[in-house]
Amino acid sequence: MTSQRTSTLADQQLLAAIRDQVVLHGVRRTTANGIAERAGISRMTFYRRMGSVENAVLAALTQEFRSYAASVHNGIPAGTGRQRLVHFAVESVRVFATSELLASIAERDPEFLIPYVTDRFGASQKLILDELHGMLDDGIADGSIEAGNGTPTAVLLAAQGVALSSRVLLKMGTFDDTLAELGRMLERYLTPSNLKAVVEA
């Protein structure tokens, strides 16, 4: 048990060191030596535990997403499955927009993110997808959501699009308005057809 706690603490310290280095220097200027020095470990230990600087940055990103997603999830108010999912999606974008790690990467090394927009989903996106699957199931069960096989991915991509544009939206002063529109869009998209018919009638 002590060994597991020590390992977990060491992992947290290493991930914190990776995050700090990327926030300060960006991805391209973050080095194994810099991370190892900040974490208080040897360069060899860094490579043994992470394999490469790119793997290390991805691990730090995943940890950032996991921490932020858990924080948002814990703050979801009571409501229908649809209300809870919409809240999670909108507030996740709001929280991720405050991430110094994501901001540093987007500003200094935006090409680092391109493969996860155009080619494949990374661990961070899969983590959010898992959250969405669970909440969609809850909404389907309580009758507040109508969903198909592609719904989780569609919701993720809608939220991701706003999140990736958060810097320009903040500069334009339209970030909060866009988040409100995202919430309304998701509400309409997820509402079952029979409930829409009742409202329209």
Image (cartoon, grey):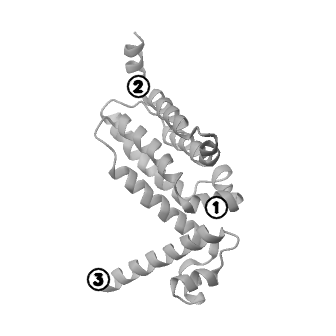
Rate crowding at label 3 as few (under 14), some (14 to 19) or many (20 or more) other CA atoms within 10 Å: few
Res 1 label: 3
Q: Quadrant of the N terminus?
A: bottom left
Q: Secondary structure at mark 2?
A: loop
Identify residue for label 2.
192
Depth check, mark 1 against mark 3: the one in front is 1
Q: Tell me what residue is drawn at x 59 percent, y 83 percent.
A: 47
193 to 172, vertically: above or below: above
Amino acid on which the number 1 mark rests in the picture = Ile
Q: Tell me what residue is drawn at x 55 percent, y 74 percent.
A: 18
Frontmost residue, 46 versus 22: 22
Amino acid on which the number 2 mark rests in the picture = Pro
Find the distance from the CA under tag 1 to the CA under tag 3: 36 Å
Frontmost residue, 29 versus 83: 29
**Residue 49, position in %: x, y?**
53, 81
**Residue 149, position in %: x, y?**
49, 38
Amino acid on which the number 3 mark rests in the picture = Met
**Residue 27, position in %: x, y?**
66, 68
Res 105 label: 1
190 to 35, vertically: above or below: above
Find the distance from the CA under tag 2 to the CA under tag 3: 49 Å
137 to 32, vertically: above or below: above
